[in-house]
Image: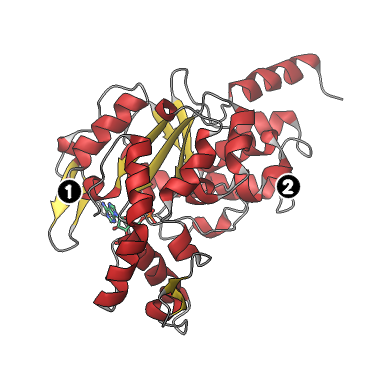
Amino acid sequence: ALDDNAMSGFLNESESKKLPQAIIIGVKKGGTRALLEFLRLHPDIRAVGAEPHFFDRNYDKGLEWYRFAVSILLEAPHSGEAPAQRDPHHNTARCQPSAETEKQTDNCARSHRRQQLLGPAFSPITSSHPAVLMELMPKSSEGQLTMEKTPSYYVTKEVPARIYTMSKDTKLIVVVRDPVTRAISDYTQTRSKKPDIPSFESLTFKNISAGLIDTTWSAVQIGMYAKHLERWLQYFPTEQLLFVSGERLISDPAGEMARVQDFLGLRRVVTEKHFHFNPAKGFPCLKRPEGNSKPHCLGKTKGRTHPNIDPEVVQRLRDFYKPYNRKFYRMTGHDFGWD
Ligand code: A3P
């Protein structure tokens, strides 16, 4: 039997585990990983490295699962892109002996121990002794903002209502990028995993001679930003959403980060001092303002070379997106300059 002190201690601890107050909800290939990594430099933010996919794939597991998954993932060693589909508590694959820093090695050891204690079939909250949970949970101090990113949220029908149900005050951030480049980036990613897929050009059209664009192809559909935004605005006022320009996140990361920190109500801690443009990579990389350690760039899967696409097809896509872009500029009050 549990003694009362242990149980009340557990409950306090559990209550102090925060659900995310701000979420990066999209868009896939917009620059969401870059934004998350930039935000992780801020001492007042605790951001989950992996993508929990709670509101789209794991919703039936309940909010307590989410709370716990977020707390576990906050502690997980993190090196770039999280494998999609993975259950948050199955972290062993992330725990490579190649951990670069001492902190990562520490995290790895802790993560292994957690796995041993909890077991692979561990179901958060219900199957563990509170004392075990208390020991394992990371503490986030008062005033810290908990965040996660799952880019598929932006385009998943059910998600706005679900986030609203968790908290109508949740701050929502969307990184958007020229939908044509985004579609090509999306295709490039898919092709890197499945090299035999048909050409971009053939996937773009339902009927190539009639010039009918296939709006059911997700690479095309995700870029119809205005259409997806309508669903969010049924639940949240525009002021609660921040649209980050994927282009500016590359050309002026500090400027875009100032907007994000203001939106989150945080001090502007992440500034020019944290960025170093790497000409070979063609992207900004991160550096510590103090000390002279080497700047850290995102992994190889970020900033891939895109294939050349038939310019006529690119133009057709530009024409297709134009009305959606116009509408999106009107809805957000911001011209992103894609046309
Ligand atoms: P490409 O690989 O097509 O260039 P996401 O993280 O949402 O999947 O977005 C990936 C995109 O982030 C990359 O797409 C790249 O253009 C963009 N990006 C933005 N800032 C970056 C940075 N500092 N380093 C690498 N990629 C960055």
Quadrant for the C terminus, please: bottom left
Identify the image quadrant of residue 72. Answer: top right
* Image x and y of residue 180, in percent: 33, 62
Q: Nearer the viewer, residue 223 or 321?
A: 321
Decide: is 123 above or below 211: above
**Residue at 38% of width from left, 48% of height from top?**
32
Residue holding disc 1 = 251
Q: Nearer the viewer, residue 335 or 115?
A: 335
Give the Cα distance between marks 2 and 1. Answer: 44 Å
Residue 40 visible in rendering: no
State the SS at label 2: loop
Amino acid at the residue labelled 1 = Ser
Task: Name the residue at the front extreme.
Answer: 210
Residue holding disc 2 = 122
State the SS at label 1: helix
Is 136 left, or right, of 119 in this rendering?
left
**Residue at 50% of width from left, 67% of height from top?**
217
Quadrant for the N terminus, please: top right
Is 196 left, or right, of 34 in this rendering?
right
* Mark carried by residue 227: none
Q: Nearer the viewer, residue 71 or 138?
A: 71
